[in-house]
């Protein structure tokens, strides 16, 4: 490249000369002058420091020094010269572009008036500059090298016409230019004649065309987007809207433009102190509500992106939204399934506890009372066994409808599962006649029921608790109501018992059982059995659940549901849990060595163990001592743990995760957990409670809770295990629904460690 510059004006009207040629090329007495013998009128010669320059004056004027110009153009012979000064001045000065003659050293030796106007220098100033002085500093070094190369080999024309570069004006501004270069020899020395054209307007035109094309492209993209797009100013006034916004909101584009974004809001948007809407959020997007032109509310997912402006005051926002009505419906449906009983559509334990929390807060604020009544139908199992589960289900639905008809709109009726119902009568005035209400409830709700031609005599046992007298929180109220209900059953059923503190006192049977259990742990009377867990995809046994068993010399076989609560209440659960953990880990290591592949081990943990400070250390030690891979150990917790001491529970479960141990929620669906708990805690696997599996009577069964749990767990990245599988039909149903693993009597009961390998091979064959 030879030159870089900017901005060409029209020819100067003052008719000033084309400039001066410096150096020895055009001296008075040179070979060119001697040959042609031609005087150059209207020129002046200036000498400085031993160098001369010839200045051509105005047309028709007298020459200043009467100098002689001599010149030779490569490849051309001047046959006849008639007034050379006029011819050269007219040709160069009339050129519409800036003309510069540069010697081999880069010195400017000739410039026309257009060069003065383009670069902002006087002609005398230009003749003191090198061509690199008219180039931005960032290009000068490269240009110097290129110029020298071009002058040495001009035939290459590597810097020829059409190069778009930049020129530097006297005021420091830059202009885009296009350079045309021609080599010329004067007085035996090589020069370059540069024609400089300012292409500022061309560039602006090209930029305008590009911007117009880009604007059309953006507009077409905006119009083609399936999402509503609104562009607002920084105050929230709508500047433009796309067709999708028209369709979403029911307003024409012309009607939307000029309106405030808050005009289409279905709910009040937060505002600043001056009343302006808050459009800058912490999260990039969130769910919002718009109002359709018809007045209907539209749930949307809205993202607001700041839009920077070229000038102050031009900033704004791009508001992108799309209809999420189907998402909201699906989410509400899943939430409803997770918080309501599938048979009666009553709230389950999860929703009941949520409501109780609110009711307790209301009582604390108003000083009112709350009554919780737990109703259990007497001998309900007989109806299922003798008449069938469909009759039992119909009975439960009728009882639920009668309970709803008996209570106020502010009261709550829930089903805990099986044949247990809960009534919450809140905001009671002190002295309310609860006994009279209970008598009416017993008379109307428990009246005979006709189901499919069978007249069923219905009775029920009710346990009652009062807040704040009988418990300070929902879990305690439920627990005490359950105790009171069993007291009612013990009293002959079909009666009501209100909770009393004496009901919590341990009876002699419990005391004796606690003493016997403590002795059994020391005498090694406990044993372990293992129930296989089968992968529904491969049919292989992939793990076992360790189950404690107690055979007492004096009491005989004591079931776990009797001695485990005693161990918890008697402070022996930590000792029992450590014993189970160490023995089960050692046994599984031996099993997998014999089987030739790894097996997972599931062990149950009680809330008391989970709250213990030494429990994590015990697990780490058991893994290290036995050599079991931490990834093969699964700790099963109950749903109740998830709602107690959530901060400590999360820390403990995270510590387990750090060890590599998996966390499993056992007996899921019995009422405690919710979607919020599942997303809050580090859970890897869910075990569906056996009570829901037992409801699968045929392949077309509508086991909605089972289906919902499987879908929900998979959506949260969790594995699903169904326990209590007893039939091939249940297995097929679960496989078709995508359940991952199963366990139950259909495959094997709990078996000794020595039989696990044999059963695993038989099931996998």
Image (spheres, helix red, strand yellow):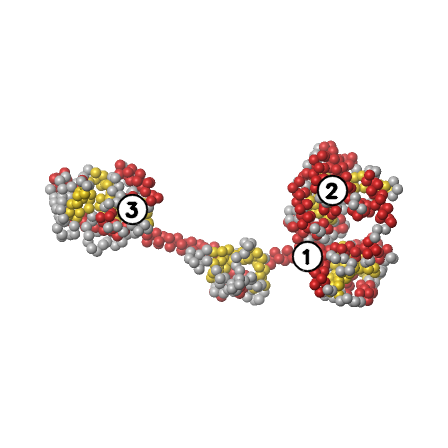
Look at the picture and state if 598 lies above or below 91: above
Distance between the alpha carbons at the discs numbered 2 and 3: 84 Å
**Badge nearest the viewer, 1 or 3:** 3
Residue position for label 2: 603
Q: Which mark is residue 336?
A: 1
Q: Is residue 537 visible?
A: no
Instruction: Please tell me which residue is depicted at 32% across the width and 52% down the height of the picture.
Output: 200
Residue 128 position in % (x across, y down): 24, 45
Q: Does residue 432 appear left or right of residue 209 in this picture?
A: right
Foreground residue among 161 and 480: 480
**Badge nearest the viewer, 2 or 3:** 3
Residue 465 position in % (x across, y down): 79, 59
Quarter placement of the N terminus:
top left
The disc, 1 or 2, on the residue closer to the chain's N-terminal end is: 1
Q: Quadrant of residue 756?
A: top right
Badge 3 density bin: few <14, some 14–19, many ≥20, Cα 10 Å:
many
Quarter placement of the C terminus:
top right
Residue position for label 3: 134
Foreground residue among 634 and 487: 487
Q: Does residue 164 appear left or right of residue 747 in this picture?
A: left
Residue 214 position in % (x across, y down): 42, 54
Q: Quadrant of residue 438?
A: bottom right
Q: Is residue 39 visible?
A: yes
Q: Secondary structure at mark 3?
A: helix
Distance between the alpha carbons at the discs numbered 1 and 3: 77 Å
Instruction: Please tell me which residue is depicted at 16% across the width and 50% down the height of the picture.
Output: 57
The disc, 2 or 3, on the residue closer to the chain's N-terminal end is: 3
Look at the picture and state if 299 lies above or below 537: below
Q: Quadrant of residue 472?
A: bottom right
């Amino acid at each position: 490249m030879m030159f870089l510059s900017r901005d060409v004006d029209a020819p100067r009207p003052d008719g000033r000369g084309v400039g001066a040629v410096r150096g020895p090329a055009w001296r008075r007495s040179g070979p060119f002058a001697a040959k042609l013998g031609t005087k150059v009128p209207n020129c002046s010669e200036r000498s400085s420091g031993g160098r001369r320059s010839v200045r051509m004056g105005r047309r028709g004027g007298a020459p200043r020094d009467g100098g002689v110009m001599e010149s030779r153009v490569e490849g051309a012979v001047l046959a006849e010269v008639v007034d050379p000064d006029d011819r050269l001045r007219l040709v160069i000065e009339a050129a519409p572009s800036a003309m510069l003659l540069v010697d081999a050293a880069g010195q400017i030796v000739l410039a026309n008036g257009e060069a003065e106007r383009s670069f902002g220098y006087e002609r005398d100033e230009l003749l003191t500059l090198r061509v690199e002085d008219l180039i931005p500093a960032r290009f000068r070094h490269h240009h110097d090298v290129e110029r020298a190369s071009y002058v040495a080999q001009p035939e290459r024309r590597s810097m020829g016409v059409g190069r778009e570069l930049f020129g530097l004006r006297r005021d420091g501004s830059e202009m885009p230019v296009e350079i045309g270069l021609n080599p010329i020899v004067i007085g035996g020395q090589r020069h370059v004649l540069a024609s400089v054209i300012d292409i500022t307007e061309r560039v602006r035109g090209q930029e305008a065309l590009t911007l117009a094309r880009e604007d059309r492209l953006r507009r077409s993209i905006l119009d083609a987007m399936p999402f509503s797009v609104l562009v607002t100013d920084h105050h929230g006034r709508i500047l433009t809207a796309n067709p999708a916004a028209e369709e979403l909101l029911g307003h024409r584009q012309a009607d939307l433009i000029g309106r405030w974004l808050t005009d289409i809001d279905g709910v009040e948007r937060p505002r600043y102190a001056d009343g302006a809407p808050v459009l800058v959020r912490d999260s990039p997007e969130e769910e919002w509500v718009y109002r359709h032109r018809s007045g209907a509310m539209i749930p949307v997912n809205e993202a607001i992106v700041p839009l920077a402006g070229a000038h102050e005051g031009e900033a704004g926002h791009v508001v992108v939204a799309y209809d999420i009505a189907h998402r909201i419906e699906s989410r509400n449906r899943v939430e409803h399934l997770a918080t309501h009983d599938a048979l009666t559509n009553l709230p389950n334990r999860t929703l009941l506890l949520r409501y109780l929390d609110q009711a307790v807060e209301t009582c604390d604020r108003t000083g009112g009372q709350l009554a919780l009544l737990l109703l259990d139908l007497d001998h309900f199992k007989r109806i299922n066994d003798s008449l069938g589960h469909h009759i039992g289900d119909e009975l439960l639905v009728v009882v639920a409808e009668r309970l709803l008809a008996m209570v106020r709109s502010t009261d709550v009726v829930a089903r805990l599962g099986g044949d247990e119902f809960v009534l919450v009568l809140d905001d009671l005035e002190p002295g309310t006649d609860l006994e009279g209400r209970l008598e009416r409830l017993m008379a109307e709700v428990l009246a005979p029921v006709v189901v499919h031609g069978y007249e069923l005599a219905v009775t029920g046992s009710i346990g009652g608790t009062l807040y704040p007298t009988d418990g300070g929180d929902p879990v305690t109220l439920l627990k005490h109501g359950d105790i009171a209900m069993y007291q009612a059953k013990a009293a002959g059923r079909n009666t009501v018992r209100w909770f009393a503190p004496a009901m919590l006192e341990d009876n002699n049977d419990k005391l004796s059982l606690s003493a016997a259990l403590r002795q059994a742990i020391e005498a090694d009377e406990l044993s372990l059995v293992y129930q296989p867990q089968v992968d529904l995809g491969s049919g292989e046994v992939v793990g076992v659940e360790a189950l404690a068993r107690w055979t007492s010399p004096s009491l005989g076989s004591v079931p776990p549901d009797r001695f485990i609560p005693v161990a918890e209440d008697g402070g022996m659960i930590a000792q029992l849990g450590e014993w189970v953990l160490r023995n089960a880990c050692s046994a599984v290591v031996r099993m997998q060595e014999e089987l030739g592949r790894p097996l997972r081990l599931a062990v149950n943990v009680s809330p008391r163990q989970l709250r213990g400070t030494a429990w994590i250390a015990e697990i780490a030690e058991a893994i290290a001592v036995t050599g079991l891979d931490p990834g093969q150990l699964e700790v099963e917790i109950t749903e109740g743990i998830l709602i107690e001491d959530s901060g400590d529970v999360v820390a403990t479960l995270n510590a387990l995760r750090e060890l590599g141990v998996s966390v499993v929620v056992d007996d899921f669906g019995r009422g405690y957990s919710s979607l919020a708990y599942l997303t809050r805690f580090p859970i890897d696997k869910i075990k569906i409670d056996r009570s829901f599996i037992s409801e699968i009577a045929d392949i077309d069964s509508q086991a909605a809770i089972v289906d919902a749990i499987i879908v929900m767990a998979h959506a949260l990245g969790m594995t699903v295990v169904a326990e209590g599988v007893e039939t091939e039909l249940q297995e097929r149903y679960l496989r078709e629904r995508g359940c991952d693993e199963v366990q139950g009597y259909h495959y094997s009961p709990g078996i000794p460690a020595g039989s696990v390998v044999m059963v695993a091979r038989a099931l996998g064959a």
